[in-house]
Amino acid sequence: MRVATWNINNVNKRIDRLVDWLQRTRPDVVALQELKCPTAQFPHEALRAAGYRGMAVGQRTWNGVALLGRGHDPLPVLTALPGDPADKEARYLEAAIHGVLYACLYLPNGNPQPGPRFDAKLRWFERLNRRAQALWASGHPVVLMGDWNVVPTDADIYRPDTWADNALLQPAPRQAYADLLAQGWTDAIATVHPKDVPFTFWDYRRRRWERDAGLRIDHILVSRMLRVADAGVDRDERGKANASDHAPVWAELTGAKAPVRRRAAGPTGV
């Protein structure tokens, strides 16, 4: 199955671009971030016409996340990240689709740092890691995907020195991401592309797309019940008219093979 994540940066403004990509690439499950619309204004009708059924948690002006299933209705599990009842930002969604649990997330940016926004980013990350640990311990097939707003290593950005003060590159969120991976999750893109890691985001400013001055901040992590067969970035979407500043990230997943259990040898060695 093919899963994908895309920070669409205003779903209604870019619905034609989204539908075109869906019809060409036909992913089975898609996570969307930064919808920039209330839940009631999510474009269900246009997506159903393209063969996708979805659920969304929206918010006026900013934030917003959604999960789409090709030919399958997502079964809601959570519409907010556990751990802080006061958190009303639309940044997290969990649903089961065709036997796999998917979490779509839009982690806070955290700029400017230091400051309250950066502190809130770290607290949100702590809650995410606790939820991820619980999902890992469940033993179910799980996929975590979205815009994580963290550049994991210096290899994931064109020039680390030009973003040295940015919240996306600070040691604390990088450590939080590393701590999550240490639970056992597989980073699909990093696994398939261990050397030349593709970027997923190019800022609109300073001709960064034209100069390929990009970052990798959109990630797909999979549990031990799934295996990554392939992964990549549909980077050409970033260069089209009316484009988001992010490109879609995708992974081909299969069910992991169960370990072979050898029978104990009997008295005859058989």
Image: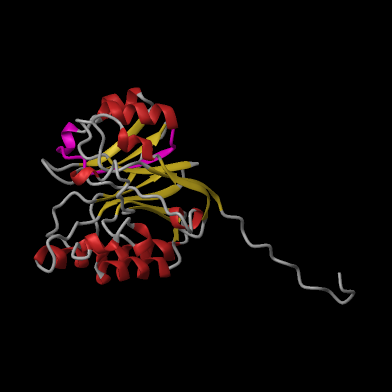
**Residue 37 image offset from top left, x and y in percent:** 15, 37
Please say whether residue 30 is one of the residues in the magenta stretch: yes
Image point (47%, 61%), residue name = 139
- Which one is in front, 123 or 246? 246
Q: Is residue 23 above or below residue 33?
A: above
Q: Is residue 100 above or below residue 70?
A: below
- The answer to whether residue 64 shows anywhere in this view is no
- Which one is in front, 2 or 164? 164
Q: Which residue in the rendered view is the most extreme toward the front?
A: 211
In-image side of 38 versus 192 (left or right): left
Q: Which residue in the rendered view is the most extreme toward the bottom?
A: 267
Image point (29%, 41%), residue name = 210
For the image, the number of numbered tags is 0
- Which one is in front, 93 or 144? 144
**Residue 257 image offset from top left, x and y in percent:** 61, 55
Q: Quadrant of residue 69?
A: top left
Please say whether residue 121 is one of the residues in the magenta stretch: no
Image point (49%, 57%), residue name = 191
Q: Which residue in the rendered view is the most extreme toward the top?
A: 49
**Residue 234 image offset from top left, x and y in percent:** 40, 39
- Looking at the rendering, in which quadrant would you find the C terminus? bottom right
Q: Magenta part of the protein: which range? A: 26-41
In-image side of 137 versus 260 (left or right): left
In-image side of 154 versus 116 (left or right): right
Q: Quadrant of residue 9?
A: top left
- State the colouring used for the structure image: secondary structure
- The answer to whether residue 197 shows anywhere in this view is yes
